[in-house]
Amino acid sequence: MTWIPSPPRHLGLVTLTVAGLLASLLGFAPSAAATHFVLDAELVDAAQRGDAAEVDRLLFEGADEDARIQPGGMTALMMAAQAGHGDVIRVLLDAGANPDAKDGDGRSALMFAAMAGPTEGLRRLLQHGAFVDAADNGGQTALMHAAARGDAEKLLLLFRHRASIRVRDSTGRTALMYAAMSGSVPAVEAMIAEGAPMEDRDAAGRTAMQWAAESRHTAVVQALRQAGARQ
C-alpha cells in the first residue's frame, strides 16, 4: 500500500517533507526522521489552534513535547502560551515540555503568556515552575512584557511568584517605566504598591514620569506625582 502523508498546516501554510513526498511517490514507508518531522509540525500547529485533544494524540504517537518551528525556534508550548490556550499548556507541561525553553529572540513561554492571552496560561506556567525572572535577548522579563501591555492582573500574579521589580533591560528601563509608557494607571499603581523605585533613570536619563509625560499619559503622571515621584 502506498503511504500518502497528511501534510500538517501551520499558520495557513502547508508543510510537506521531501522525504514524505518521495515516500508517497515511490511507495516506500517513510523514515523515522520523516515521521517525527511531520508529527512535530502537526503538534505545533495543533498547539497554536488550541486543539488539546489533538495535541494529546500526537504526543501519544511520538511527537516531541518540545517541538519547534523554524525560523524563529518557537516551541509548541510558546505557541499555546501566545494564543492563550490554557488546556494545551496543561497537556504539554504534563507531558514534560520545558517551560524555560527559549526561541531565537530569547523569549520563553512565560514571556509569551505575559504578552498575550488570558491570565490562566500565565498561571499554569508559573505553577509548573517556570523561571519568573528569565530575560530575553533585550533583557526584558515577563514582568516587563506584562507592564508594557498595562496588564495589572498579570503583574499582580507575577508579584505573587516573586518577580523582581528592580531588573533592568538592555536600555536600562524598568518594569515601572514600561507600565508608565502603557498608559495604564492600574498597572502603574500595582508597581508602586509593590515598591517600584520611581526615580530610577534609564540609559537615556529618563524616569518613569518622563516616559509617561512624553507619551502624553497625564493620568499616569498624576498617579506618579501623588505617590511621591518628583520628576
Image (cartoon, rainbow, N blue to C red):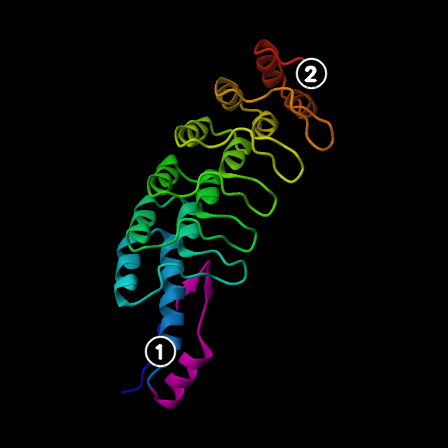
The amino acid pointed to by label 1 is Ala
Q: Residues within 10 Å of mark 2 (few under 14, many from 20)?
A: some
Count every numbered label the image shows and give the total: 2
Q: Secondary structure at mark 2?
A: loop
Q: State the residue lying farthest toward the right.
A: 204
Q: Give the percent coordinates (x, y) of residue 71.
A: 54, 62
In this rendering, would 206 be left or right of 157? right
Q: Is residue 189 above or below residue 205?
A: above
> Mark number for residue 231?
2
The picture quadrant where one finds residue 172 is top right
What residue is rendered at 36% in x and 54% in y?
Answer: 97
Q: CA distance from mark 2 to mark 1?
A: 63 Å
Label 1: state its secondary structure: helix
Taking the magenta stretch, the answer to whether it contains residue 14 is yes
The residue at the point 40 percent across, 71 percent down is 37
**Mark 1 lies on residue:** 32
Left or right, 108 with reference to 50: right
Q: Which residues are magenta?
A: 8-28
Residue 218, x across and y down, in percent: 63, 17
Residue placed most toward the observer, 130 or 53? 130
